[in-house]
Image (cartoon, rainbow, N blue to C red):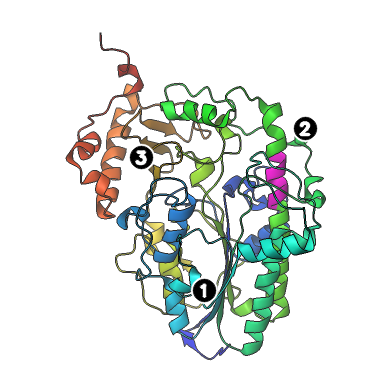
Amino acid sequence: MDTEATRHGALVTPNILLIVADQHRFDCVGASDDYPVDTPNLDRLAAEGAWFTSAFTPIPLCTPARQSLLTGRRPEASGNLWNYDLGPRIPALEPSSYAWPRGLRDAGYRSQYVGKWHVHPDLDPTAFGYGEYVPLEAYRSWREERYPGASLKPRDWWGSVDPVPTVDSRTHWLAGQTARFIREAGAAGTPWHARLDFVEPHLPCQPTEEFASRYAAEHVPRWRNFADPLVDKPYIQQQQLVNWGVEDYGWEDWAPAVARYYAVIAQLDDAIGHVLDAVDKAGASAETLVIYTSDHGDMCGAHGMMDKHYVMYDDVVRVPLIMRWPEHLTAGTVIDHFTYNTLDLVPTIADLVGIAQPEHPHGARIFSTDTGVLTPSSELASRQHVVSTYNGQQFGLFTQRMIRTRRWKYVWNPTDVDELYDLEQDPGEIHNHVADKNCSDVLESLRHSLYEQLSADGDDIVANEWMARQLNTGRKLNPAHLHSRS
């Protein structure tokens, strides 16, 4: 890599290693100092770089979140609302859409995408700027040939133990492909971008025996918000329990699944360690920007629920985000400013590399690049709230919009009861205060702020006069009104 090519004075144009997990909760990283999941390699990244304590996904659903990570725009702005493989088909992301990897290609970067794609039903990453692509199907073929009869069961939602050795598991095979690319690209002397997308820890969790044996179900602590009676909350939340058949499950039923979730995260972390080792051995650590995040979180028994649909709890909207770039990002930095892990990464990467920005981005630059040391940008520091959206279709169409400040979270459910949570007093989001008259001023303010943000971001749901009226004039029922008509 040409270390003489600089931008912004002291900043060297970096290699970029972007690692994306699927359904990794913020509180299941050692750096969060919360639940007892062993993640020494992610903790090392955080200690050597920046750990973001208030990072959120703009949408807790795989396909639209991954599209936003390419375009820097909310999915509602382009009409890509949900997973294309689980419901009514909608227009896919146009290949002509802005995608920052194209800018890297044009700037002379060599790039490779490894693992889960789930962005477009027909086009692969090379249509959006990546030079090379190693799909999940490549691992499946390799595994079937090497271990006939040891296939993973895709519909065993509660998980199981993967019978193959860890070194030949999916996590480690994908990591090996990325490590190989880093060695080859580093030897070529050109800047490179590697993107590694794991399936894990998305359910079903299937850790190898090496990691499954580390977590006994009886030692896994309950989620603090496990025992939620779901009183005065949207009907769909209780229906979700029935959809999955978990309405009568106690913690003893959930604990084995949570133990496997822990275990597969630990396995994922171990695989990431091999990739970081490859960066070190290539002598590229100082000039490589490493980013780790997840598309969204996972309920995994929190509030008694499974997966991530039809809710806006922090369990699914709050995500891990770690960035490391030695000499430019001070080791041990903790950034508590509200951050969008996808929307903000796009303009940030574009700025650091010096490529074209997305037109009308919905995120902001994370860092100021005025000096050789990266510090939070003024846009990030001034952000007072985050907004996340949902347009689910897996169990029936249901639209949600969330706005979250430091203390309050308001969830607008246009066709059901809204939700209002006091996060200072109730961080588990158990008690819905939407009908509390003492909170009416807070509710009104959040509704107006949400309307303004959705309008600014081009969300057509508020272009509808009847929907806009719900937010702007409070034309919305609360739980106390639902049974009052005689």
To which residue does mark 3 refer?
399
**Residue closer to the observer: 188 or 402:** 188
Helix, strand or loop under label 3: strand
Mark before the other along the chain sequence, 3 or 2: 2
Quote the CA–CA distance across marks 2 and 1: 46 Å
Other-residue count near label 1 (Cα within 10 Å), few / some / many at <14 / 14–19 / ≥20: some
Image point (35%, 52%), residue name: 90
Quote the CA–CA distance across marks 1 and 3: 41 Å
- Point out the residue furthest to the left here: 465
Image point (50%, 78%), residue name: 372
Q: Quadrant of the N terminus?
A: bottom right
Q: Is residue 233 above or below residue 281?
A: above
Other-residue count near label 3 (Cα within 10 Å), few / some / many at <14 / 14–19 / ≥20: some
Q: Which residues are magenta?
A: 258-265
Q: Amino acid at mark 1?
A: Val
Q: Amino acid at mark 3?
A: Thr
Camera-near label (2 vs 1) is 2
The answer to whether residue 365 is seen in the rendering is no
Q: Main secondary structure of the magenta part?
A: helix
Q: With 455 as the anchor, is 393 left or right in this view?
A: right
**Residue closer to the observer: 45 or 274:** 274
Give the number of the disc on residue 218.
2
Instruction: Examine the image and state in which quarter residue 298 appears.
Output: top right
Quote the CA–CA distance across marks 3 and 2: 37 Å
Mark before the other along the chain sequence, 1 or 3: 1
Q: Decide whether residue 89 is among the magenta residues.
A: no
Q: Quadrant of the C terminus?
A: top left
To which residue does mark 1 refer?
373
